[in-house]
Amino acid sequence: MQKSNRKIFDTLISRTKIYLAIIFILLVIICIENYKMIIPSVILYTAIVIYSYYTNTKKKNEISETLQDLTLTVDSAAKTTLINSPFPLIILEADGNVIWKSAKFTTEFANVDINTYVKDLNADIKSEIKNNEEKSNQQKTRKDVVRQVKIGNKDYQVVGRYISLKNRDKKSKQDYMVMMYFIDNTENIKLQKEYKDSKSCFGIIMVDNYEETMQRLDASEKPLVTAEIDKKMYDWANKTNGVLIKSDRDRYVYLFEQRYLEAVKEDKFSILDQIKEIDNKEKLQFTLSIAVSNEGVTDKEKYKAAQDAMDVVLGRGGDQAVIRENEIYKFFGGRAQEVEKRTKVKARVVAHALENLIKESKKVMIMGHTNPDMDAIGSSMGIYRLAKTLNRNAYIVNSEATSSAISAFKQTLDKDPEYEDVIINKEVALENIDEDTLLVVVDTHKVNYVDTPELLEKAKKIVVIDHHRRSADYIEDATLIFQEVYASSAAELVTELLQYAEVKIDLKTIEAESLYAGIMMDTKNFTFKTGVRTFEAAAYLRRCGVDIIRVKKWFQSDLTSFNLIAGIVKEAEIVSEGIAISTYEETTKDASLICAKAADELLTISDITASFVLGNTGDKICISGRSIGDINVQVILEKLGGGGHITLAGAQVEGMTMEETKQELINRIHEYFSEIE
């Protein structure tokens, strides 16, 4: 307003000058024509100038008075608004002394010890002032600090504003004063919570072994068992006021509000155990796979997220539940031994699809996990032979191979000139991969556990063949996935693919023996996790010319290694009933392999049902876990970022010492048993 009036006044002065100039010119013209008009013209012009000056001065004063009155009115309104503020307001000195507080502040906190809250808020603001001054040489004169505070049964948004005192007394130590507004935000927070709680969560529930189990029941018993399953499912869903819809014979869709999500977590999906308690004449046991998610904006997106979570559950072997929230998976259950229930149909379908992918590619690269074992190497050799049979160039990416078994295998491999350029390192692989390259990942599905993670980013087509229970960090963009947790090894899965391929595959002896060695290693000489399909695969490989004695020689340990493992076993301690833990203190890249052998050896001791051995690889602490099936070592080590199977699992921990990792492992073991109770 003031700026606008100045423009008007300036304009008025300019026009007056123009008028005076025009009058002066006219009077000069008149005086030239008539000299007698000089004196009257001077008198007239002087009078006009005096009058103009008087009127302009008068108008300027009137405008100034108007502006002054307006300013006084605004200041008065501001003061009135401040005093009668609808929000509780308090003004403090830098040291916390109260300068003034509004009447609303006094009445609002009459029954609350507000001084403590004000003191803490003032200290918080002072801390922020100090941080701002350190970040900037030029001190800011005004800054808002917003904090959320719960006072009594109300939630407040506190807006603190500090103002520098530029014209302060030099003797005074007060650099600023603080104004705090307390805005009651209770209703808004309640509405936000209600909005969040009322959002929907989607769940998918599947009966894992429905078809296989129902086929073994009497016709008269089937409807009774089905009815009991449905009743237990609906009763469990009613606890959360959820809606349960049976979409198929073995599939349910579960919809409930997010306010009940914490209750579902605390319940730990008790329905998993309730279903197992269903009694039938054949003493068969039903298990469930459950996936719940609240991710997504629309219900369709949430349902899609639940489907993705279900893929993870099924990839881990079923009999468990998972909650996917903020892209984080939380697992429940999964402590029972997997039951072999895969069909040969899937192996035939995958074999056909894999053949087509190989034919569509110009070359094939095969990659296992870091520190590859015989299962990874054997699986790679099997896929290599399939690609070569289809007339495609194939290469095995292997950056590290340190175990004695692989060293012995490589010595045998080096005798055949065909494999001279087959095994390539990371650098060569990255240099040669292109859009027409098919990348086959074997014996792992974890992004950070593959031999060369960079290849995953460059490959356009990826195939995953694995037998481990699926982890949260799995390879998501794979073109084809053959992940069967019921298989003993990746070598067993590859052997099946070779059997069901449309082309006739002639395995070389070294290739058949490497596949056999992979199966033998993961089953501990056909002792653990062996099914009918395992022996069928072994029989096929045996017919291909496997020399069992030569394979066993690959796994022979020298006397030094044997004594080393014996020393680790000797130092083992029992930390819980039936669980032994030992450590391998020497720092070496072979630590994970030595720990695995020591963990296996510990299981040969009576009364030990599970074993864990820790080692130091230099940059990580590795853990090898083994069990005879009573304890799920995979669930325990998954809490430390690892994975595997119920009887065989591993983990790698960074940023912790050996002793810290050991203590953390013990805590996780105790946590495992507390969750079972």
Image (spheres, rainbow, N blue to C red):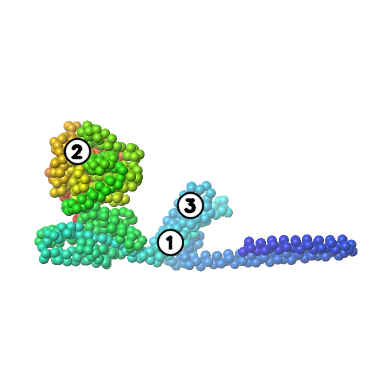
Q: Which residue is mark 2?
A: 508
Which of labels 2 and 1 is toward the front? 2
User: Do we see residue 270 in this rendering?
Assistant: no
Q: Which residue is mark 1?
A: 157
Looking at the image, residue 69 sits to the left or right of residue 135; the answer is: right
Q: Amino acid at mark 3?
A: Ile
Residue 612 in which image quadrant = top left
* Residue drawn where x is 18% and y is 43% of the image: 519
Disc 3 versus disc 2: distance between alpha carbons?
75 Å
Looking at the image, residue 401 sits to the left or right of residue 168; the answer is: left
User: Considering depth in this image, is 84 or 418 the residue closer to the camera?
Assistant: 418
User: Do we see residue 309 in this rendering?
Assistant: yes
Helix, strand or loop at mark 1: strand
User: Considering depth in this image, is 28 or 87 the residue closer to the camera?
Assistant: 28
Residue 592 in which image quadrant = top left
- Mark number displayed over residue 635: none
Q: Where is residue 74 shown, x and y percent of the image? A: 58, 65
Q: Where is residue 110 shown, x and y percent of the image? A: 42, 66
Looking at the image, residue 106 sits to the left or right of residue 12; the answer is: left
Q: Please say if 59 is above or below 421.
A: below
Mark 3 vs 2: CB contact within 8 A:
no
Q: Which residue is mark 3?
A: 129
Q: Where is residue 672 shown, x and y percent of the image? A: 22, 51
Q: Amino acid at mark 1?
A: Gln
Helix, strand or loop at mark 2: loop
Looking at the image, residue 97 sits to the left or right of residue 423; the answer is: right
Disc 1 versus disc 3: distance between alpha carbons?
19 Å
